[in-house]
Image: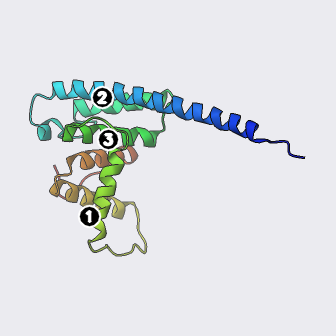
Amino acid sequence: MSVINQTLVNAVIKAFAGEASAVAKARTAQDKAINVVLDAMFIACDKPKAEFLKGNAKTNDARGQVKAMFDSIVEKGFISKASAASYQSAFWIAFEKGVSFERGLANKQTADTKKADDAKPKSGAVEKTDIPALHKTLSKALAQARLLNQTLFAADLVDLITDTWPDFKETILSK
């Protein structure tokens, strides 16, 4: 005896499709609202973008305001801290490139970078380490990012590092 017939299955599928449609509609509205903020930031930019973007959320008022906006969304429980960091990166990528905000911009940039990096030689394996060694490695990564003019990535990395280790000091290419 079959209890679950195709009509019941179709009703469940339709309910899930309704949720997917509502989520897509909500995301479109969210992205539109973020683009309004992005437009306001374009208008506020009264100097070259490289200069306007210099620093991180603690030293640059514009970066601080954007971080605070996404942090407040996290505090309300609407997105995770990781999503907020990703959206914040996407915001600054959109700003730097002069394009509309898309929540996946940071992932697209990472994928493009990964494709280019796949052709390069890899670094050696880590056998053992400690926090001071990690700080030295992170300092090297920051120096590399700055040498490659990856200002958004470097600023995001500094924010992440200093949120985790407030006493972190760059030892290479200090500002």
Residue found 42% across the figure and 75% down from its top: 127
Residue in the foreground of this view, choosing between 51 and 13: 13
The disc label shown at residue 35, or none = 2
Residue in the foreground of this view, choosing between 119 and 47: 119
Picture coordinates of residue 62, whole percent (x, y): 23, 30
Picture coordinates of residue 37, whole percent (x, y): 29, 25
Q: CA distance from mark 2 to mark 1?
A: 29 Å
Whether residue 157 is visible, yes or no, is: yes
Residue type pointed to by label 1: Ala
State the residue lying farthest toward the right.
1
Q: Quadrant of residue 29?
A: top left
Relative placement, left or right, of 41 versus 138 is left
Compare marks 2 and 1 and give the one earlier in the sequence: 2
Residue type pointed to by label 2: Asn
Compare marks 3 and 1 and give the one earlier in the sequence: 3
The disc label shown at residue 90, or none = 3
Q: How is the image coloured?
A: rainbow
The disc label shown at residue 116, or none = 1
Compare marks 3 and 2 and give the one earlier in the sequence: 2
Residue found 48% across the figure and 35% down from its top: 79
